[in-house]
Image: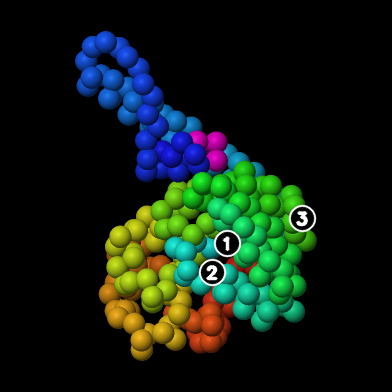
Amino acid sequence: MCATCGCSGGTILEHHDHGHDHGHDHEHRETRTVTLEQAVLARNDALAELNRTWLAEHSILAVNLMSSPGAGKTTLLERTIRELGAELRVSVVEGDQETVLDADRIRATGAPAVQINTGAGCHLDAQMLAGGLRTLDPPEHSVVLIENVGNLVCPALFDLGEQARVVITSVTEGAEKPRKYPQMFRAADLVLLNKIDLLPYVDFDVADFLDGARRANPGVEVLQLSATTGEGIAGWYGWLRARLP
């Protein structure tokens, strides 16, 4: 577990000089690491339930968008807001380690946005979202789109209280992503394969990608689109409308 952000995968090491069996010391560290990880996730899950209750009480749809950096999350958000803005009241929570660049891009569309910078942290958590919701104060019967920190590992582990999780990947990243990062795809309610306008110019096996995604998450819906050209974007809009309170 990462000592900075609490994400799983690293190890918190503590030095205990017992003066005897090193195997016992190793077991002690492993036990303490697992206990700390469980405590972090349990606290996060409790806060996520509070977020989920608040969102339901206000009839707000919250969607957690997760991807590796550069998959096109912000471009997708910009197009979604511009094309659905007259129909849906959309606000955005932006997660990045530093800068307000993406929040500024979202505000330029006319939608309210709040930037959450995680520093060295590799994901948003439920407490961060709670703070973002307090700042945004989204109206009832609206949509909150959460752009998580670009990462295909940690965000899958942390429930934010959202109603749905969307994984965005692109044809420029490689068709093997579902096999390399299965936990992320298992957590998805929807997978968006973005940048399909670039398929003629890259070596990307769509069938292999789809097979990997469905091996990780049988039955998961996968939509192919281009946030740049708009090709296939209607499927994403239809999916979003179907989940409105």
| Measured Cα–Cα span from mark 1 to mark 2 | 7 Å
Classify 238 as above or below 118: below
Q: Residue furthest top?
A: 19
- Which residue is located at x 51 percent, y 46 percent? 120
Answer whether residue 43 is magenta in the image.
Answer: yes
Query: What crowding class fits label 3: few (fewer than 14 Cα within 10 Å), some (14-19), or many (20 or more)?
Result: few
- Measured as percent of width and height from the top left, residue 244 is found at 65, 68
Residue for badge 1: 147
Q: In the rendered structure, which disc, 1 or 2, sits on the residue that comes first in sequence?
A: 2
* Image coordinates for residue 241, horizontal then vertical, percent: 62, 74
Furthest residue in direction front, as rendered: 99
Residue numbers of the magenta segment? 40-44
Mark number, residue 73: 2
Q: Are marks 1 and 2 in contact (CB under 8 Å)?
A: yes
How packed mark 1 is, by other alpha carbons closer than 10 Å (few <14, some 14-19, many 20 or more), is: many
Does the magenta stretch mainly form a helix, a strand or a loop?
helix
Which residue sits at x=62%, y=43%? 127
Estimate the x, y position of residue 170 in percent, counting from the top left.
Answer: 42, 74
Query: What's the residue type where badge 2 is placed?
Result: Lys
Q: Secondary structure at mark 2?
A: helix
Residue 62 placement, left or right of 222: right
Q: Which residue is mark 3?
A: 137
